[in-house]
Amino acid sequence: MKKINHLESARKTINLESEGLKNLAKTLNKDFSILCDYLLTTKGRIICLGVGKSGHIANKISATLSSTGSPAFFINAAEALHGDVGAITKKDSVIIFSHSGESDEVINLFPTLKNIKCNVFSVTGNPRSTISQQSTVNIDTGVLVEACPLDLAPTTSTTAALAIGDAIAVALLEAKDFKSDDFAKSHPGGKLGKRLLLKVKDIMHQGKEMPKVLPTTYLSEVLVEISSKGLGIALIIDTNNKLKGVFTDGDLRRAMHSKLEIHKTKITEVMSKKVKTIDEFALATKAIEIMQMNEIYVLVALDKAKKPSGIIRMHDLLKSGLV
């Protein structure tokens, strides 16, 4: 086995690919804008089509498009020849990914695509190739040499094709004024979806779970309420359901240090009047920010009338998978 400097090899590969991307950014022309305008008016879906390594790129781009507001799916060119082309309709737009622009599996599809009468576009490394010439719009990656020292394995070319696909997705996203809320709708699962969708109201303790006492309650009774609800806090609320203060473990330690008589001390004498709160409809991630900033572990959630509706703790945020 030949001994080489792996780090030097890696840097060389990355530099070659980055140079390819820099060149692409310079050579990209108005055809890119024309392609995006076509895609924005597509009434059906965007089909990303390819075979081999280009097929993998096409598959990834279809996923990126779908998650950013442009419904898309991937079709392997070889499988399309054996029935999958039936999923394509006249309303769809097809983007073909092929570095050589001469993939037989794709070329053999053109008669069928023309019969369907769908728009056909391509991303290739040869603007004079068969696939490029038969496309309504062709985007040239401009890649002449691969990072592979044998100039065989698709490296720089696939990186460039991937960058073009991402650029298309972002351009369409911006044109459609796609927002984070829209992104969240297509990412309901996992930590990302939770960060964009999970509200304080979804995980807070509310109703009978909330430890609540009146301002006239004695400290001894408050301790019983805290113990029974197990949240380490009690809300002091008047008869109009207005929050007057809170009593936490920290307040208890201070009270014990002062050697107060728990059966004779009213909660208003030892409660904390400055309370950190959060809107119940705020993102749960906002609760994390407030807690970390103030070095606390619990917040009182307020409803639209600014009255206490729940309690959210750092433990609840940890349990939800957000932290």
Image: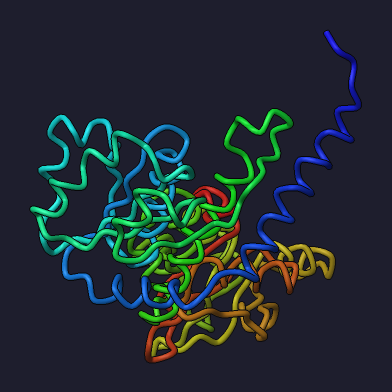
Task: Report the side of 79 relative to 122 (left or right).
Answer: left
Compared with 135, 34 (above or below) is below
From the top left corner, tell me how far across and down residue 304 is, in percent.
37, 88
Q: Look at the image and tell me whether residue 227 can be seen.
A: no
Q: Look at the image and tell me whether residue 12 can be seen.
A: yes
In this view, the residue farthest toward the front is 128
From the top left corner, tell me how far across and down residue 132 is, in percent.
38, 55
Residue nearer the viewer, 307 or 188: 188
Q: How is the image coloured?
A: rainbow
Residue nearer the viewer, 151 or 252: 151
Residue in the picture at 73% in, 73% down: 293
Quadrant where the image shows the N terminus: top right
Q: Quadrant of residue 207?
A: bottom left
Q: Quadrant of residue 27?
A: bottom right
From the top left corner, tell me how far across and down residue 242 is, in percent.
45, 89
Q: Quadrant of residue 40?
A: bottom left
